Amino acid sequence: MVLPPSFYQDALRVLAECNRRDVQVAHAFQTNGTLISDEWCSFIKANNVRVGVSIDGPEFLHDTNRKTRSGRETFSRVISGIQRLRAHAVPFHVITVLTRASLDYPDELFEFYLEHGIRQVAFNIEEIEGIHLNSSLNSPEICERFGDFLDRFYDLVQISGEPFFVREFAAAVAGIMADGGRQECFTHQTIAMAIVSVDCHGNFSTWSPELLGLRSVHYGNFTLGNVMTDSFDSIFATPKFQHLSEDITAGVRSCQTTCEYFPFCGGGAPVNKYFENGSFRSTETMFCRLTKKTVFDVVLQKLETEAASRQAAPMTALDGA
Amino acid sequence: MELERGIRISVLPRFRPTLLTRVELYLNSGVERSGSGFTARDDWRPLDKEELRMLIVSEADAPEDRSERIELLEIPGHLHQQWRATAPELATRSGRPSREYQRLVASLASFFCFKKVHVENCSLTIRAAEFPHGSVFASLGSPPGLKTGPVEESPLLAVNLGEEPTSLIILNLSIRRLRELVASRGMTQDLPDRLTQQFMALFPKYPLVRLVLPARHGVRFFPAAVVHSGYAEKKNELDVLLRITGTPKSIS
């Protein structure tokens, strides 16, 4: 949102003019929320843009890590942005990055979301990626605490009776219900060109979106081409693409042969494999332990418990009449 | 007499740190005789920065001996709402706790267990003051007023379930320090309650600390180790506290 809405209005106009095949295009912004204005709200509504706001919970959690370049806190500005969205009746979701500190506060997080009209949440975790060489979640006891957090948050959502969407829970339920587990899911991050990421200079990449902005000792940068000079098709023959594709595919195959969660996960996130383990060919990461395995286990246990209690419920007068 | 560094106020681990930065504290000019005991003078004033530094401490710097801490906590709004829904029925019902009350107790226990405040073998009760402007903190035990509590009720976790703030009044000196001060006047040290009376008779101007607990806010402390009372003078409603005490009993 550093550029004004008028820039994007022009961009959308150009996109519409170029869309000769009438492809359905959906637009989405993920914003830190500090620059949301009335003008932005009008633009978002008029163009049906999906909006995500990054906020890590109540002030004492959010301002621990979300600061401006000069070190100033941002919570009050983000909340103002959210209030503006609500005043304009703009639907939005939030992304909350969970750290070790967050895990003690599921009740506080849930109440915060309710208080501010937040009803769609996606939980990211503090990842190890690029220059972020470690994570507060990278320790052996964290899986249990993470599971306890999810378990409690799940209960809070159920108890509240409020319509409340949690991306992780929904994905887990969908994965569990997918043909009784016989259907394997896939992740776009492991399939070449399923996701195409383009930066402001026209450089593009694929697989995990984060790769576009990162560098490595093995591959240099992960840029595969530039839209000004290269077609998407042209990258398939390049040595860089082939090298990356081989390594990422090998990693997926290793996951497939070694991990019981593969039907739910589809082979992990390449960017996490590389930056946590040093290789795309690797398998388990902190990211998948927490956001796939632990989430899956918690939700599965909840569904099984719910199913068991429904089975055990006493018959009413109407049953079996 | 001026406030000394003694019992400190911190936040119970895994509860939000802002409870400490937003805590409301007052100091008075000591005690006055009331019947057979002593009560706090009602001339409360805000603390200055130095006094705050003496009382408030981060969890990392809090005394290792938990009996020398008053730890702040807060229950979430949904539990308070659950209490509100249950309260009217408790006012009229007698006998076996209702299913709603048992659910409330289970919800509270679940919350505290998540926060690693294990209450499985503790006694959980909800107590209301017997009359308006009365404080549950003050009314427990005999005589009423400033005193220590029974050992078997330590630690005590108390939460304000009302809609209006209530207050905990404390003498921020440990029992050990009371003995030293009483001994410095050539008196013998006695059982904690009589020691308290001796101290107050000898040092009536030592200031007391009043800690305001808004709705849903609470404290965990060791009543046997802290001379304390309560304050609910300005309340319109009856003082109501959730009390979880350390005695291993079934939850009721």
Image (tube, coloured by chain):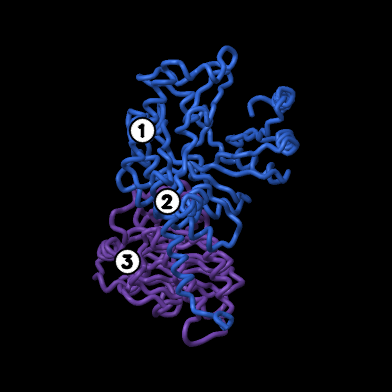
Chain colours: A blue, B purple
Q: Does the residue at mark 2 contact the one at mark 3 (Cβ under 8 Å)?
A: no
- Tell me which corner region of the image, top left, top right, bottom left or bottom right, holds residue B140: bottom left
**Could you tell which of marks 1 and 2 lies nearer the N-terminus?**
1
Q: Nearer the viewer, residue A117 or B4?
A: A117
Q: Read off the chain for label 2.
A: A
**How far from the left and from the top, in percent, is residue B56?**
41, 51
Disc 3 residue type?
A: Ala
**How far from the left and from the top, in percent, is residue A222?**
45, 21
Residue at the location (55% across, 20% down)? Answer: A232
User: In this picture, is A200 found above or below A142?
Assistant: above
Q: Nearer the viewer, mark 3 or mark 1?
A: 1
Q: Does the residue at mark 3 contact the one at mark 1 (Cβ under 8 Å)?
A: no
Residue at the location (38% across, 54% down)? Answer: B13
| Same subunit: marks 2 and 3 | no
Helix, strand or loop under label 1: helix
Residue hosting label 2: A296
Residue hosting label 3: B225
Q: Distance of mark 3 from mark 1, alpha carbons?
A: 60 Å
Left or right: where B186 falls relative to B116: left
Residue at the location (55% across, 39% down)? Answer: A54
Q: Read off the chain for label 1.
A: A
Q: Quadrant of the N terminus of chain A?
A: top right
Disc 2 residue type?
A: Phe
| Same subunit: marks 3 and 1 | no
Q: Nearer the viewer, mark 1 or mark 2?
A: 1
Residue hosting label 1: A251
Q: Quadrant of the C terminus of chain A?
A: bottom right
Helix, strand or loop under label 3: loop
Q: Does the residue at mark 1 contact the one at mark 2 (Cβ under 8 Å)?
A: no
**Res B115 seen here:** yes
Q: Nearer the viewer, residue B141 or B10?
A: B10
Left or right: where B227 falls relative to A179: left
